[in-house]
Image (cartoon, grey):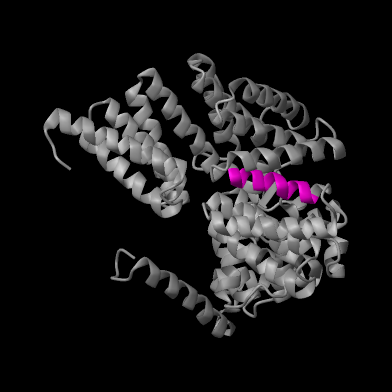
Amino acid sequence: MRQTADSFGDYLKLYGDSWRDLDRYSEELLDYEDRTLYSTWNISLTLIQAQDATAAELLRLMAYFDNQDLWYELFQAGAEDQPLWWSEMMGNKVRFNRAMSKLHDYSLVEPGVGRYSLHTCVHDWTMEYLNRNFDEGLWQLAVHCVAQSVKWETEREYWVENRRLLPHAQRLKASRERRQSGWEEVKARDIIMIAELFRQLDMSAEAEEMYIRALQGYEKVMGLEHTLTLNTVNNLGTLYRKQGKMVEAEQMYIRALQGYEKVWGPEHTSTLRTVNSLGNLYRKQGKMVEAEQVYIRALQGYEKVWGLEHTSTLRTVHNLGTLYSEQGKMVEAEQMYIRALQGEKKALGPEHTSTLNTVHNLGTLYSNQGKMVEAEQMYIQALQGKEKALGLEHTSTLDTVNNLGNLYRKQGKMVEAEQMYIRALQGYQKAWGPEHTSALDTVNNMGNLYKIQGKMVEAEQMYVRALRGYEEARGPAHPNTRLIAANLRVLRIAMNLDHGRIN
């Protein structure tokens, strides 16, 4: 590229064209004496096919996965109800290892500790030559393997496996888009799990696309009131809530709730899950009375069905703690958080993200009570755990970064507070965009910080930006909008008194 005027995009196109040229003129390269990579791989493939045809087919399948991290359990997760050769190979790890060993004999795969990998050029060859005619069946098999490997958030250390799966899901999506064909033939349950993976890892646009695909499939095949359809509606509502799309979220939740009540009744766990989700939505909207009512309904239902220590029960206990904290009911909030934390440590372990979220919220509660030492301990514990479990840029990690900034501001640690706010804001803007309410909350916090520091112009800029964003996102009547407007009015009064400004 340094020797030409081509852009990186031009280079990638030329790179793809070169594979097609090799395919077209490959007959000229089959003499092994030429020592070309292409001819060597073709000869190796011919020998592998003669010795172990299923190993050659496995190599073709690997074209649809990422090349850096492949392991037996990833493939084995999709072994049921698949082609006979695949079920036979994946039913026995010894058989799988023998196939991979054969590929390694010809330097097509490299073994590592608990994983295999392909060189980038070999991987390109598997797609551009071995799969020059896109194999729909193999691609769907790869989707199934990845989808069935996705872990739910209730499972221990789910984040470890799911972060490992992400490159494979992205490869599947890219290869499908490259062929300009849809996902219509993919099982909806597999699409749901891919959507769940994207949602957990903060890839909201990709998750929404997958959920909508799955919903359309379920509506067409199962009908509007089938439980699989309603489950997808509920999940889409949760995604919209986290995106700040409150109207769309409420529509999804109400539709799911009415459907569950009709199909399963008011006390079924699926019904109660949506009731709990509605509580989260109402709390975010500032509808505290409605939120408490639905939380209590969900809690009483879960305690009756699952018992006091089930994770679904504990999740609602945690949510009630958050509601009470926001209402200023500090004693009740602490009781709920302590109950949730003890149960989560026992059921899920101290490093599970649900446990860490409760630790984070206890930090917020202690901060509001003026217990600064205890609050800092909670926040640092939550931050370290989230960075390890979810990564530095996950929005849940950023929530703790933002709140640690609030704590440092209260403690008078202005430099540390600004560092936290800047990190949180940059992360939120990258993950959600500059107009998301999480980003706007941090902008407002920065306004508070600059006001305390006497940086009135910078504070005004932050407040104006936050106010405009909140008016657009939530409307002028939302409590946060009114609070930011009040902050701005107080600041401008102070600016007029201090500097004689007229605004």
Query: How many numbered discs sit on the rendered protein?
Result: 0
Whether 71 is among the magenta residues is no
Residue at (50%, 81%) from the top-left corner?
21
Q: Residue 346: horizontal and vertical position, in percent?
A: 77, 26
441 left or right of 137 in image: left
| Picture residue at 43% right of the left edge, 75% below the top | 14
Q: Main secondary structure of the magenta part?
A: helix
> Percent from the top left, x then y, of residue 203?
55, 54
Q: Return the residue nearer the eye: 211 or 128.
A: 211
Give the vertical position of 3 relative to 277 (above or below): below
Give above or below for 356 relative to 284.
Answer: above
- What residue lies at 77% left-to-right and 31% top-to-bottom? 347
Query: Does any portion of residue 138 appear in the rendered image?
Result: no
Q: Relative to 126, say whether 316 is above or below.
A: above
| Residue lying at the far left of the rendered structure | 500
Residue plotted at (49% across, 74% down): 16
Q: Is the N terminus in the top left, top right, bottom left or bottom right quadrant?
A: bottom left
| Residue 405 horizontal side relative to residue 337, left or right | left
- Quadrant in the rendering for residue 260: bottom right
Does residue 441 appear to the left or right of 177 in the view shown? left
In the image, 99 versus 259, the foreground residue is 259
- Residue 336 percent location from the top left of the image: 68, 26
- Quadrant where the C terminus is found in the figure: top left
Name which quarter of the figure residue 355 lies in: top right
Q: Nearer the viewer, residue 331 or 460?
A: 331
The residue nearer to you, when weighing 288 against 229, is: 288
In the rendered image, is residue 160 in sight?
yes
Magenta-drawn segment? 270-282
Q: In which quadrant of the rendered view does residue 249 lie?
A: bottom right
